[in-house]
Image: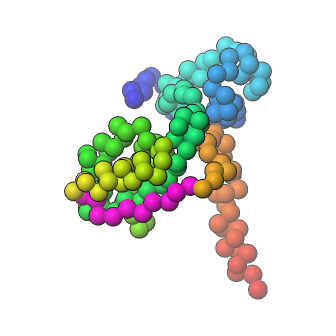
Amino acid sequence: MVRDKGQEARPLDTFDRKILGELARDAGLSYADLGSRVGLSAPAVHERVKRLRATGRIRGTVAMLDGPATGKPFLAFVHVDSTGWGKTQELLALSALPEVEEIHSVAGDTCMLLKVRCASSRALEGLLARLYALPSVKATRSYVVLSTFLERTPQAGITEVLETERAVVEADNTLP
């Protein structure tokens, strides 16, 4: 993605967060509808959305598809253990498969984390076979999702108290 160097990434204000929140719920809103929901005029919202796009805070506009309705009801998270750091061209090439929704380099007891959505357990088995065919892959652990209670894109809001929650909990633990 190429960002417009003329646009500074200033901190998000309340209106920006409201706009992002509404767009996360429904990216198809008109600027007039969006403006009425956040308390700004349509031209003001249009300028803010343009700036949010130019600074990379809005990376694109997509439809959120329903996995089971598209023939892929089988959701799993696959932990991949590999030699070295883990991020190899071969492993990243799996992003070409439509079943692979996310690939993350992670800290902890595994190197990479994949979110995959398949048509069946047999399709997951085929994907795992592809993983094991890669020379850097040592092992995998798969976690099959039974039910999903929340699945969404990144949200614009910030829960400020979470920044201080640890300090509050630690302070409470020191009381007699």
For the N terminus, the quadrant is: top left
- Can residue 62 be seen? yes
105 lies left or right of 71: left
Residue 168 falls in which quadrant of the image? Answer: bottom right
Total labels drawn? 0
- Can residue 13 be seen? no
Question: x%, y% of residue 102?
Answer: 45, 45
Above or below: residue 162 compared with residue 90: below
Question: x%, y% of residue 35?
Answer: 73, 20
| Residue at x-position 26% and y-position 45% | 89
Residue at the farthest bottom position: 176
Question: x%, y% of residue 147?
Answer: 63, 53
Q: Main secondary structure of the magenta part?
A: strand
Residue at the farthest left position: 135
Given residues 86 and 65, the one toward you in this image is: 65
Task: Verify whether residue 115 appears in magenta.
Answer: no
Task: Verify whether residue 140 appears in magenta.
Answer: yes
| Residue at x-position 48% and y-position 43% | 119
Above or below: residue 50 compared with residue 124: above
Given residues 67 and 115, the one toward you in this image is: 67
Given residues 93 and 84, the one toward you in this image is: 93
Range of magenta residues: 136-145
Above or below: residue 127 compared with residue 30: below
| Residue at x-position 53% and y-position 37% | 71
For the C terminus, the quadrant is: bottom right
- Coloring scheme of the render? rainbow
85 lies left or right of 124: left
Above or below: residue 160 compared with residue 110: above
69 lies left or right of 126: right
Question: x%, y% of residue 47?
Answer: 60, 18
